[in-house]
Amino acid sequence: MHPCPLCNGTLAPFGADRRRPYFRCAHCALVSTDPGCHLDAGAEKALYDIHDNQLDDPGYRRFLSRLTGPLLARLAPGSQGLDFGCGPGPALAAMLTEAGMQMRLYDPYYAPDPTALAQQYDFVTCTEVVEHFNHPADSWARLAGLVKTGGWLGVMTKLVIDQDRFANWHYKNDPTHVSFHSEATFAWLAERFGFIWQRVDTDVILLQKR
């Protein structure tokens, strides 16, 4: 069996469906799929292109406000931020710009600007992205390195509760979702990369770099 893609720890079976098996790490608690089940870049982008998240959609903005509200309460006016994995319709960055923040965008498919990854920021947002990490060790190291000391990393993703609920969880059925986090995973990430973390809403985690 392959090792954990986040911490290289030992995996144990965590369930399976008709398409793929799932494994949970005994060390960092990440639940992951077999790498052989990952989509190639073309198939992955084709599914992302179907997403229809409009900048001015009130419902989508309400969804994102569960992150922007708690984050803005912790930011100084005019802070510099990066929306990592912004997708084709960067509504989150628009909301933060409207609130007076200075935003840059990065997305491997829709905003592939390497210069955006060459500096550090007062805050980085990452909404509905970490579940897509094919190589979570590399991706989390990159994310952590983008945040200044004292800065914030805001993450939105649905969390694993337990094995029974996972078995019937709709979230795992998206074939682009390959890395599933729990509170225990975020506790491990915070320790590994030097953050203090807190869960501020159902699917929202804020981490502050020590």
Image (cartoon, rainbow, N blue to C red):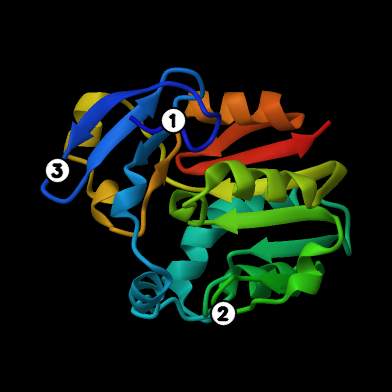
**Residue type, mark 3 in image:** Asp
Horizontal and vertical percent position of residue 160? 37, 33
Q: Which residue is mark 2?
A: 110
- Mark 1 — residue? 3
**In the image, residue 87 lies at what x, y percent?**
53, 73
Q: Is residue 196 visible?
A: no
Gap in Å between the C-alphas at discs 2 and 3?
Answer: 31 Å
Give the spatial CA distance, label 1 vs label 2: 31 Å
Q: Earlier in the sequence, mark 1 or mark 2?
A: 1
| Residue at point 88%, 60% (across, down) | 77
Q: Is residue 180 left or right of residue 102?
A: left
Name the residue tied to disc 3.
17
Left or right for 206, reference 48 = right
Q: Nearer the viewer, mark 3 or mark 1?
A: 1
Instruction: From the viewer's side, name the closer residue of 164 and 74.
Output: 164
The mark nearer the N terminus, 2 or 3, is 3
Quadrant including the C terminus: top right
